[in-house]
Image (cartoon, rainbow, N blue to C red):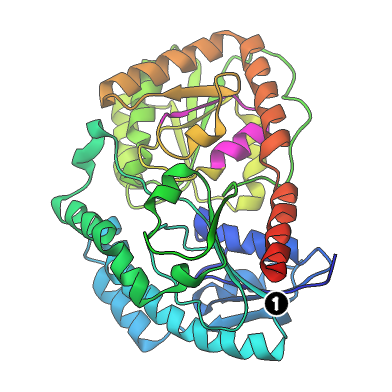
Amino acid sequence: MPKLNVLIICEHASNIFGGEAMLPLNYFRHLSKTHHNVYLITHARVRASILQIVDINQDNVFYVPDTYMHKFLNRHSVVLPERVRIITFGFLMHLITQAYQWKLARKIVKDKKIHVIHEPAPVSAVQPSAMFGLGVPVIIGPMNGGMSFPTAFQYMASKSERILYQAMRVFSSVYNLCIPGKLFAKYLLVANKRTEDALPRFRLGEVIEVVENGVFSVLDNPKPISQPNIINVLFVGRLVDWKAVDILIDAVGLCKDGVKLTILGDGPLRQKLEKHAQNIVPNKVEFLGLVPHAETNQYYDNADIFVLPSVRECGGAVVLEAMARGLPVIATAWGGPMDYITAESGYLVEPKSRTYMVEQFSAIIDKLANEPELRYQIGQAAIDRIKKHFLWSAKIEQVINVYNHALKS
């Protein structure tokens, strides 16, 4: 296989900025372990976290500056609801970043004799890309989007948010013609059919389905069958409204004695959720805050059940992480988790209503709490599914094949 010079471009490549930022970092780190030469362009705001990573070549990382305009937009966006901020001020900040990335990419393509450019993030299917006209094939994705709230949870999107999202989808083909990276990309990688359907109408490149998320390691077996006095339910994620952690807290409140909930993560709703937990289930919920990703496996290994109650989850890498540690997973039958969980390897709860979800999560938790053999059986099925479909080693091999096809064609 020929040695390639690959340039990865993204706004954030970081292990502390959330799941989407980890994707390009994972591509960079693990492609760098192959015989190919891999370079990365990202934003200066993640420099501190990247400098702490010891297993990468820091000389191959290039940063675009955090400009006055970035800081101005960020400062004046804090008053907006998070999702509105992302699709307005966040969108403008990304366009500024892309302008600097394009200029830097043009130089690196020439200096490093780049063969192919890969833009793995943002994962939005409709957000335009400025990575075109650089003289080499461009691959974008895997993207994962086209999401909305379930019917029973439409109220969670404000009127302004619904209008903005609708406008983005209506005009996505127009502004993707004005900023035509996706029009001219050699390949557009998507996680599922839902995302393919959300892509801009006008595009010249081929669409290829590639799993968005994955894991690097997997156990051979779940932990041995046992029946502890305390059944530990685990949640990992940001504490924001669409993660629906309040539903999980209420569900644990309905469970039998001996079921406790551990919450890893932080976010704007933490204080509100802590107060809610204290009112509903005092002494049954523990908030541990943000934990470095490298340390999360010990929490998976101490858990008995993993739950992700999100009602707007495009991906859900934590589901795969829990499955890889042999945990039975319960998640919402909406978005990303539906791509990962089968009837044999976990449970999916329909988002029919808040009350229905609370009752179903509670009933399934109690069932698993009472049946250690069932926990083991589902955990083993989860491990087997991870080995077959969701290992990063297979993803890296697949993406390298895409690079080679892009050059051959």
Q: Is residue 405 left or right of residue 181?
A: right
Residue in the image at 67% along x and 90% along y: 110
Residue in the image at 57% along x and 82% along y: 63
Q: On the image, numbered disc 1 is attached to which residue?
A: 115
Residue in the image at 71% along x and 28% along y: 384
Q: Is residue 120 left or right of residue 109?
A: left
- Residue 105 at x, y = what percent? 58, 84
- Residue 285 at x, y = what percent? 43, 31
Residue 328 among magenta residues:
yes
Q: Residues within 10 Å of mark 1 (few under 14, many from 20)?
A: many
Is 127 situated above or below 332?
below
Q: Is residue 222 left or right of residue 136?
A: right
- Residue 378 at x, y = what percent? 63, 19
User: In front: 116, or 366?
Assistant: 116
In the rendered view of the protein, which quadrant contains the C terminus?
A: bottom right
In the rendered view of the protein, which quadrant contains the N terminus?
A: bottom right
Residue in the image at 61% along x and 51% along y: 293
Dividing the picture into quarters, in which one does residue 246 lie?
top left
Amino acid type assigned to the residue bearing label 1 in the image: His
Most distant residue in the left direction = 159
User: In front: 170, or 293?
Assistant: 170
Kind of element beneath mark 1? loop
- Residue 389 at x, y = what percent? 67, 37
Is 380 situated above or below 66?
above
Is 224 situated above or below 95?
above
Dividing the picture into quarters, in which one does residue 355 lie?
top left
Q: Which residues fall within the magenta stretch?
A: 318-333
Residue 62 among magenta residues:
no
Residue 16 appearing in the image: no
Q: Is residue 71 left or right of residue 107?
A: left
Residue 193 appearing in the image: yes
